[in-house]
Image (cartoon, rainbow, N blue to C red):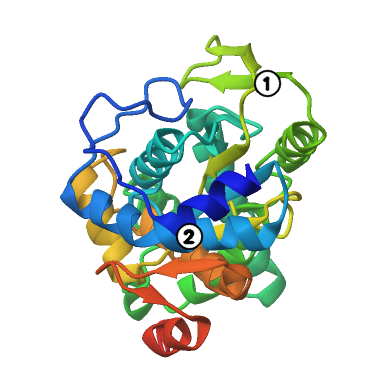
Amino acid sequence: MLERIQSLIDNGYCLPEVTADIPHGDMPGDKIGIDEGHVKKAQKIFPELLKKLAENGREKAVISVCGGSGVGKSEIASVLGYYLRSVNIGTYVLSGDNYPRRIPMYNDAERLSAFRCAGIRGMIADGVYTDEIGQKLIELQKEELDPEPKKVQEYPWLLSYQTHGKAALTDYLGTKNEIDFDEVSAILSAFKAGEKEIFLKRMGRTDTELWYSRVDFSEVNVLIVEWTHGNSDFLQGVDIPILLNSTPEETLAHRRARNRDGKTDSAFTTMVLGIEQKKLHDQAHKAGIIISKDGELLDFASYSALMDGQF
């Protein structure tokens, strides 16, 4: 692979047109909508990726494409994989969303439970919980307004609840409690060790949609992991993390455009996105390639300046 990459860098290459039917990642039922913006970003990333692969110096390399919800990870990873295959570099695109410990419905419930239970325990510890307040809190929970920051003005005791709840949610999101990072790390290790066939997990949205597929890696030299958590400290084996950057406001706008879960504007979803965004920001210094929402390649200093004051 390395000789092939160096030849491409030295002699140039011609990238093919991207059509709607190019191969996508391996998340069951995932809807991929590749548009001109995704293609332009992939075209900007690709030359830098070849350079990074050459610098990496391994015949088998792992790339991650990470970023906030709705930023285009699946689409851009698919295009990058298509480009690599078009220049005769065997590539497989793996979706990290197959590896949570719970299906989405149960995981959403676990997130909310972590927030609410810790919030109430925190109120008790702070000495602000009463029977009357408890009843009011139940009303707010039924209306899904208990994570709403603006409600603190009306109910000052809600600050204690939200502060402790958010801390517990932070300790859950994107950690080994929520995600089986060890299984993904083991897959990356097996790939790099030259395993010709690896069983990969498939997870749908119900508790009966769970199975494994045997995947042939004998002709694969690059494994692309498309995943929010592709630059996490819990994930071992990634050689080149690619960060698709967006500000918290841009991420929420992406979510609204996709309308993926029907609760895009809920206070709890906004809190979850904010926590995920902060974790992406804290990990950004490890990214090998960073590209802005507008398609500009950024070094870490430029990224830091762009994100200054966002958190």
**Does dot 1 land on a helix, a strand or a loop?**
loop
Q: Quadrant of the N terminus?
A: top right
| Distance from Cα at disc 2 to Cα at disc 1 | 27 Å
| Three-letter code for the amino acid on which mark 1 is drawn | Ser
The percent coordinates of residue 56 (x first, y second) are: 68, 59
Question: Decide: marks 2, 1 in contact (CB < 8 A)?
Answer: no
The residue indicated by pointer 2 is 10
Q: Position of residue 195 (x, y in %)?
A: 78, 24
Give 158 or 132, whichever is nearer the viewer.
158
Amino acid type, label 2: Asp
Vertical side of 7 occupied by 93: above or below: above
The earlier-in-sequence mark between 2 and 1 is 2
Image quarter of residue 74: top left
| Residue in view at x 32 percent, y 76 percent | 154
Is label 2 in a helix, a strand or a loop? Answer: helix
Residue 32 occupies which quadrant of the picture? Answer: top left
Above or below, comparing residue 278 to residue 57 in the picture: below
Q: Position of residue 217 (x, y in %)?
A: 65, 23
Q: Which mark is residue 218?
A: 1
* Total count of labels: 2
Looking at the picture, tell me which residue is in the foreground, 151 or 229: 229
**Residue nearest the viewer, comparing 125 with 306:** 306
120 vs 214, nearest the viewer: 214
Q: Is residue 169 visible?
A: no
Residue 156, percent from left and from top: 43, 79
Q: Nearer the viewer, mark 2 or mark 1?
A: 2
Please state if 136 lies on the left or on the right of 181 as rendered: left
Give the left or right position of residue 24, taking residue 234 as reference: left
